[in-house]
Image (spheres, rainbow, N blue to C red):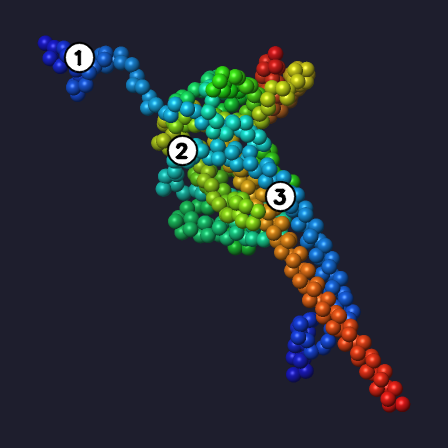
Amino acid sequence: MFSARRLLGLGPRGLPLLRPRARAYAEPAAAGPAQMAFTFASPTQVFYNGANVKQVDVPTLTGSFGILASHVPTLQVLKPGVVTVYAEDGTATKYFVSSGSVTVHADSTVQVLAEEAVTMDMLDLATAKSNLEKAVSEMAAASDEAAKAEAQIKVEANEALVKALE
Amino acid sequence: MFARGAAVALYQPQWGQVRNMATLKDITRRLKSIKNIQKITKSMKMVSAAKYARAERELKPARVYGTGALALYEKAEIKAPEDKKKYLLIGVSSDRGLCGAIHTSIAKTMKNEITNLSNAGKEVMVVGVGDKIRGLLQRTHSNYFLLTFKEVGRRPPNFGDASVIASELLNSGYEFDEGSVIYNRFRSVISYKTDEKPIFSLETVAGSESLSIYDDIDADVLRNYQEFTLANILYYSLKESTTSEQSARMTAMDNASKNASEMIDKLTLTFNRTRQAVITKELIEIISGAAAL
């Protein structure tokens, strides 16, 4: 027979059981601070330092994702692409990054460290397209593994540039 | 007896309290050379001041960048397990001297670290960034050297230099477990402090328990991340080091110019005294010669 505890909806520890164990929702994560302290810098320039922003979209090797406050901690590596920063008032600013790292800590501090980062108005679509063609021909002409890999990197970076500008 | 007397005469000081009066020509020559040296030290000070201004400007974003890169190690409190044996010491300095105690402070810290670590039973290897480090540690600790980097300090360091150092380190084949970068942290124009920042190997970071709170990390991503962080830490230490060095060189050349002007003042007085003495002697000779006639 069912025990009285079960009827009352209590589990073995006297705590209320929401659902049978196998189908319970995950517990809410220990909430980090509601605000994100966002640092975005390249070796030569600091864009944001501990700033309070709403959301950041980053392109990583495992895919693009957006980071809000209280995001689960993670470490990621950037790939060439666009970083979009949504400020508190909703305005979005875009930057093109070449590579780098993203760190989200448990206390909602986010560090995006890019090897090269520029605002979109520093880039020219025509130059990007011609660089892309050059890189593709380089890859076709590459002889050994190392040259091929370098050319491949150039192709990817230029493709991302062209895509970002169009 | 005779020989010893001659030897003593050789080592007598040239000016100050001398038995033989320095001739006018000696003093003139000395005065001219010190004036030239003062010109050189003054111009070196100007050059250092210009380089320092630029280095300090570039240090500001580099500091944000460096603290961002080190934040993971601090927040996750990564520590190497006690039984790990292989340690790596990176001393960051430059090729050029005349900058006060910059190189010697790094070398002293490194020597102490090597002694402590060897006594604790760890295997230590040393990397010197800058020729001076190699020179200072060559005689006593040459068998600890893994790599040396030259042509440091001529141009301001950029991220490319740091990544070259990082890639050479990783390709060197020395599988270190943990290490530290020893550099001079810039505090102000007149002061800097020798500081140490930790670096960890991929295995240490991956095996650290606090890393499990970080979601969705696979080995490849972590390795990329680690290599990038190593380059970042090196870049930060290079920038701090350059700024400290330029400010120290500015101070050292300033002191040298001041010392030179002091010496010039003293010598000028001696020169005038000597000149007057020579004139007086000639007058006396003339007068006594005339009196004798």
Q: Label 2 belongs to which residue?
A: B75
Residue beneath disc 3: B52
Residue B202 point in image, percent of width and height: 44, 33
**Front one among A156 and A40:** A40
Residue at mark 3: chain: B
The residue that appears at 34% across and 23% down in the rendered structure is A31
Answer whether residue A155 is visible to the viewer in this image. no
- Across and down, in percent, residue B43 comes to 70, 50
For mark 1, what is the residue?
A: A9
Instruction: Find residue A26 and report its image quarter.
Output: top left
Q: Chain of mark 2?
A: B
Residue at image coords 73%, 59%:
B35
Q: Chain of mark 1?
A: A
Q: Classify mark 2: residues with Cα within 10 Å, few (<14), some (14-19) or many (20+).
A: few
Nearest to the observer: residue B139 or residue A62: A62
Say what amino acid the circle numbered 3 marks: Tyr
C-alpha separation, residue under disc 1 versus residue under disc 2 = 41 Å
Q: Identify the secondary structure beneath mark 3.
A: helix
Nearer-N-terminus badge (2/3) = 3
Q: Could you tell me residue B58's position as x and y percent?
A: 59, 36
Q: CA distance from mark 1 to mark 3?
A: 72 Å
Nearest to viewer (mark 1 / mark 3): 3
Q: Residues within 10 Å of mark 3 (few under 14, many from 20)?
A: many
Q: Nearer the viewer, residue B290 or B116?
A: B290
Name which residue type carries label 1.
Answer: Gly
